[in-house]
Amino acid sequence: MHRLFILLTISILSISAHGQSLRIAKLKYDGGGDWYANKTSLPNLIEFCNRNLNTDIAREDDIVEVGNPDLFLYPYVYMTGHGNVVFNSQQAENLRNYLTSGGFLHIDDNYGLDTYIRLEMKKVFPNLEFVELPFDHPIYHQKYDFADGLPKIHEHDSKPAQGYGIIYEGRLVCFYSYESDLGNGWEDQVIYNDPEEVRQKALKMGANIISFAFTSNL
């Protein structure tokens, strides 16, 4: 078993054993894209998970830079934005080491991220591709059942919502929600005025992702 995977696992178990809250983080990246978008999304998702999954996640999300060793402190890291993303070689290596050692990255396209993130993730995994996950993948069937896969939260250009993944040695290390806008659905209701039914779909799918990230690596 990889040493860094062991360290990540021990960290998760130790935090749980001592009654301390797990923490999740938003990924800060270079290139000028708005990595900081959807400021209320993760706090709302955390509240939903703590209430409905009985998790004990710290109420405020952290921010971690893609090249920072602190990346390894988080079992789940969230990445979003509308525009440009650039990983240098050190950042790509750090992210690759994190993911291959037990970490989990959720990339959430906020419309406009797709072209850039596909190029940059090739720096992380030159020999791997995003693959569309089948509807029977476990990430869609944690506490909440999504028989038709990723839910559509916001409409942009009439494309279906699609869930992609990067699979390393049989393990899903990165989930990419495309044409869905899950993060917008997690935002405070007053921001987009989404119907509560739509927000609940987004939050439930987010809870499934958190559940999968927390349990698939232990």
Image (cartoon, helix red, strand yellow):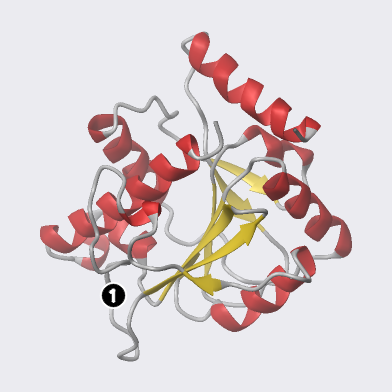
Closest to the observer: 33 or 212? 212
Q: Is residue 207 left or right of residue 60?
A: left
Where is residue 177 drawn, in percent x and y?
44, 67
Quadrant in which residue 111 is drawn: bottom left
Q: Is residue 179 left or right of residue 34?
A: left
Where is residue 159 drawn, in percent x and y?
34, 87
As drawn, 168 above or below 6: below
Where is residue 63 drawn, in percent x and y?
60, 44
Regarding residue 40, the answer to whether it shows in the image is no
Closest to the observer: 11 or 57? 11
As drawn, 180 above or below 58: below
> Residue flagged by tag 1: what amino acid is it?
His
Where is residue 82 drawn, in percent x and y?
52, 75
Regarding residue 33, the answer to whether it shows in the image is yes
Q: Is residue 118 left or right of residue 114?
A: right
As drawn, 126 above or below 215: below
Quadrant in which residue 92 is drawn: bottom right
| Quadrant into which the N terminus falls | top right
Residue shown at 77% from the left, 47% from the top: 97
Residue shown at 72% from the left, 26% from the top: 7
Q: What residue is shown with label 1?
A: 154
Residue shown at 72% from the left, 37% from the top: 70
Q: Is residue 1 left or right of residue 174?
A: right
* SS for callout 1: loop
Residue shown at 43% from the left, 53% from the top: 39
As drawn, 204 above or below 23: below
Residue extending farthest top: 18
- Binning the other alpha carbons within 10 Å of mark 1 as few (below 14), some (14 to 19) or many (20 upward) gives many
Q: Exactly how many numbered labels are in the figure? A: 1
